[in-house]
Image: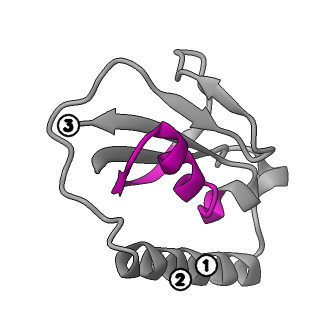
Amino acid sequence: MNDFLLIFRRDFQSPETQPSEEQLKDHLQQWQDWYKILAAEDRLSRPLQRWDSDGRVLKSNKSVTNGPYAEIKETIGGLVIIKAESYEDALEVAQGSPVLQLGGSVEVRKGF
């Protein structure tokens, strides 16, 4: 197993992308449920010590790009370090992230 850093980004500046109070409450519950699943699957890992210069970004439309790049305009909303066999495995785990439901993205970086 390898360690992968998942960085959750979303455009918190745009008023039209802001969820209601009820949506935020539901969204927080989804995060809590997702973390419980990661813990039950023994996917949570230790703090990242070093990481390579390569990375992948999973968008809410399920597209995957190499990156990230300097023109990113989203705000980092949080991060977690998980255990996965490969980038593909880490991207599969990242697809469960609730940030994607609000139009956010997940940057995936491999650590060691």
Question: Label 1: which residue?
Answer: 30
**Mark 1, secondary structure of its residue:** helix
Tag 3–tag 2 contact (CB < 8 Å):
no
The mark that comes first in sequence, 3 or 2, is 2
Report how far apart the C-alphas of labels 3 and 2 lie in the structure. Answer: 27 Å
Residue 109, horizontal then vertical, whole percent: 40, 35
Amino acid found under the numbered disc labelled 3: Phe
Q: Residue at x 45, y 45 (%)?
A: 7
Residue under the image location 75 percent in, 36 percent down: 63
Q: Quadrant of the C terminus?
A: top left
Query: Of circles 3 and 2, which is in front?
Result: 3
Q: Which residue is mark 2?
A: 33
Determine whether the residue tagged by mark 3 lies in a helix, strand or loop. Answer: loop
Residue 99 occupies which quadrant of the picture?
A: bottom right
Q: Residues within 10 Å of mark 2 (few under 14, many from 20)?
A: few
Which residues lie in the magenta part? Answer: 76-99
Q: Check contact, mark 2 vs mark 1: CB within 8 A.
A: yes
Q: Is residue 5 visible?
A: yes
Task: Tell which circle, 3 or 1, labels the residue nearer the N-terminal end.
Answer: 1
At label 2, which amino acid type do we have? Asp
Name the disc covering residue 112, or none. 3
Residue 94: % across, % down: 55, 54
Comparing 32 with 37, the one in front is 37
